[in-house]
Amino acid sequence: MGQSLVKNYIHIVFSTKYRKHLIDEEIQEELFAYLGGVCNQLECYPIKIGGYTNHVHILCKLSQKVLLMTLLNKLKSNSSKWIKTKGKRYSQFYWQDGYGAFSVNPSQVGIVINYIANQKQHHKMKTFKSEYRAFLHKYNVDYDERYVWD
C-alpha cells in the first residue's frame, strides 16, 4: 500500500487527584476548550469534551503520528499547569496518575457524544467510581481495585 489510512476514535477518561471536586462551573468550559486545543495541536482532533466536577471525558480521533501515552501526558501536564494560573483556589490542582482509554466503533460515536454531553445529569444518579467501573466491565478490562483509585 502506498498510503496509510487511519481513523481511530478513542474515548479517554481521567480524574482529578483523589477525585477532588475542583472542576467547578467557573473553569469547566474553559478547561474543556483548553483540552481541545491540546488535542488539536497533536492532530488528535476532538469530537466532544466534557465531564463533571472531578473528571473529564474526551472523545477524539487518535492521530497516526502520536502515541496515546504522549497525548495523555500533554493533556494532563499542560492543562494542570494552565489551570493553576486561573486563581489561588486552583493552586493545588493535579490529575490522577492513571487514565482509561477505550476504542469507539464509528457507529457508536453519536452515543458517546451524547453520553459526554449529559455528564451533569448522569452524575446526579451515579458516582465517578461506579461510572468508571462500568466502563472497565463493558470493555472487559482486567484491573485490580487497589490500584485504580490511588
Image: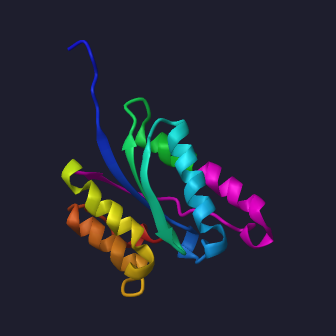
Q: Looking at the picture, how far across and down is residue 109, in whole percent?
A: 27, 54
- How many marks the image carries: the answer is 0
Is residue 24 visible in the rendered image? The answer is no
Residue 46's place in the image compared with 53, above or below, is: above
Magenta stretch contains residue 103: yes
Q: Is 15 situated left or right of 125 in this image?
A: right
Taking the view exactly as shown, the residue that stands out farthest to the top is: 2
Between 84 and 148, the residue placed more toward the observer is: 84
Taking the view exactly as shown, the residue that stands out farthest to the bottom is: 125
Please provide the residue range marked out in magenta.
76-105
Residue at position x 28%, y 22% from top?
Answer: 4
Residue at position x 57%, y 55% from top?
Answer: 33
Residue 132's place in the image compared with 59, above or below, is: below
Q: Is 41 situated left or right of 110 in this image?
A: right
Is residue 119 visible in the rendered image? The answer is yes
Q: Looking at the picture, how far across and down is residue 61, in whole percent?
A: 37, 43
Q: Is 78 situated left or right of 107 in this image?
A: right
Between 113 and 72, the residue placed more toward the observer is: 113
Residue 13's place in the image compared with 23, above or below, is: above
The quarter of the picture where residue 7 lies is: top left
Q: Looking at the picture, how far across and down is residue 14, in whole percent?
A: 47, 62
Magenta stretch contains residue 96: yes
Between 67 and 27, the residue placed more toward the observer is: 27
The quarter of the picture where residue 18 lies is: bottom right
Point out the image quarter for the N terminus.
Answer: top left
Residue at position x 30%, y 41% from top?
Answer: 8
Residue at position x 56%, y 68% from top?
Answer: 16
Q: Looking at the picture, how far across and down is residue 111, in whole percent?
A: 26, 63
